Image: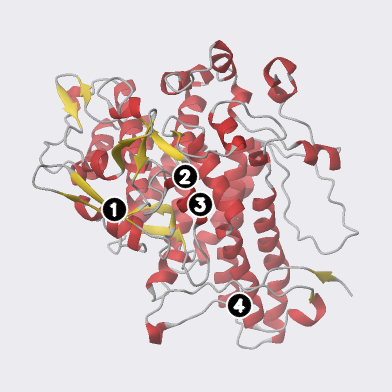
Amino acid sequence: MKKITIYLSAILMLSLSGCTDWLDIRPENEIVLEDFWKTESQATSVLSSCYRGLILNDCIERMEVWGEVRSDNVVEGNSLYIDLFKVMNTQITPTNVYANWAPFYEVINYCNTFLYFAPNVVKSDPNFTETKLHTMEAEALTIRALCYFYLVRTFKEVPLILDPSLSDTQDYIVAKSTEREILDQIISDLLIAQKTARADYGVGAYNKGRVTVNAVNALFADVYLWDQQYDKCVETCDRILGNPALQLVDGDKLLNTVFFSGNSKESIFELQFDKDISYSFLVNSYYGYSDNNFGQLSFPVYLSKTGIYSPFNYAASATKESIKDLREKTFYGTKTNGSGSVIYKYALIQCTEKADETYAPTYRNLSTTVNWILYRLADIILMKAEASVELNNMDEALRLVNRTYLRSNLTADSLQIVNYSSKADMEKLVLRERQRELMFEGKRWFDLMRLVRRKGDPTTILAYLSPKLTGGNMQIKKMSIMNALYMPILKSELEINPKLTQNPFYEDSEFMN
């Protein structure tokens, strides 16, 4: 008989206690396949393992490292891991631990396993209807698409695996698929999920922590934006923006309500953590907490000063953006370690304005943990703004930017189109507003990569990274090569899979020294 070792977890509905701890992560190993796929509860337990895989530290850490650490948003904090330091400073080699894509392929395999076996349960359990099956398939397809979207943006070309690993006799020697093939599969999966995903689960943690049609569309909009299908991005964003249940949180409540309490009215999809089930070690390690205010990452001091690199106090023609922006006061602090400022977002409970107009932080302690937000309404608004610029709809883009801008600039006037007279000016405005709004959420590197891909010129990124690149001309030369902007394939993967080929940049000995 075939056996598969898989982590199975039960989804807990604890409505009587008012608890939102719905993901219990207790593993059961060596499940006999022929004896297992019989009931709805068994299918549900495997589906929940897809979610569990996303919140394991190896997976969620890569979301942050691949999406934020390489960008201009962060510099070294305290006790930075050596491999993390190398990623941050363009010293990446094929032996770097963050070139390991295995955590995402583990989640993909959970999804493939569910998609392969779950249809059989309909035949054996009359309570497991076709409708329930298709709803749960939408969840698995969306999670698989999310994993491949991280992989394709990070490595560009990766193996496309759609079948589960069931036995040691399977052929695991798979070549890379092209970026186009990966994106087409993601789009195909999301088109299916879009039709059958649930709109509402009736419970707050489920609505934010499980895949809903809003979550499908949020990922879909992101994919279309990356793929430069701007009309479809706008159309998909509108599906979300038309939902009255989603609303922006007031700017002075953003830190506490969205990033500490979690599952807010602004949230679309966030990974659920609870101190009794699973801890968000990434947030503690990278951003800090009450006993360790400085995590491994900090916000560059040069970005907190007025100037062409700063997203705050920015001179735009005859006016300035973000002079008294709440995000400047509550997303990072004034305490520095020399090159970087302490990060507040996710690390704090709240940041309170005092009579002298300074802000007092209240840190989380280790008895609390926080969810990790993948998509929220502000992100969707600014995705649509970015797509609108590329469609030459500047008035609409500015209207959307003002939605997020004005909630954090309470005494400011609306930004005016007269100060952004060209498409290039509007592109930069949207990019700045996304930086102000989404800093430290694992978005910035991908935002910069979309800019590079549109321009077809890797040197475009240097305008943002050059203040951070203090290692001389070699760093600048590296970041001027398109393939250098993608990660290498891990050396050990190449050794066990002869069909894989390395990203050509990492085969050049000039850059590997």
Q: Nearer the viewer, residue 162 or 97?
A: 97
Q: Residue at x 43, y 29 (%)?
A: 72
Q: Sequence-wise, which precedes: disc 1 or disc 2? A: 2
Distance in Å between CA atoms under marks 1 and 2: 24 Å
Tell me whether circle 1 and circle 2 mark residues in contact (CB < 8 Å).
no
Q: Which of the two discs, 4 and 3, labels the residue nearer the N terminus?
A: 4
The residue indicated by pointer 4 is 130
Q: Which amino acid does label 2 sit on?
A: Asp
Q: Nearer the viewer, mark 4 or mark 2?
A: 2
The reply to whether residue 501 is visible in this rendering is yes
Mark nearer the N terminus (2 vs 3): 2
Does dot 2 land on a helix, a strand or a loop? helix
Q: Residue flagged by tag 1: what amino acid is it?
A: Leu
Asked whether residue 457 is in view, the answer is: no
Q: Name the residue under label 3.
A: 282
Q: Where is residue 287 in the image (x, y as percent from the top left)?
A: 42, 46
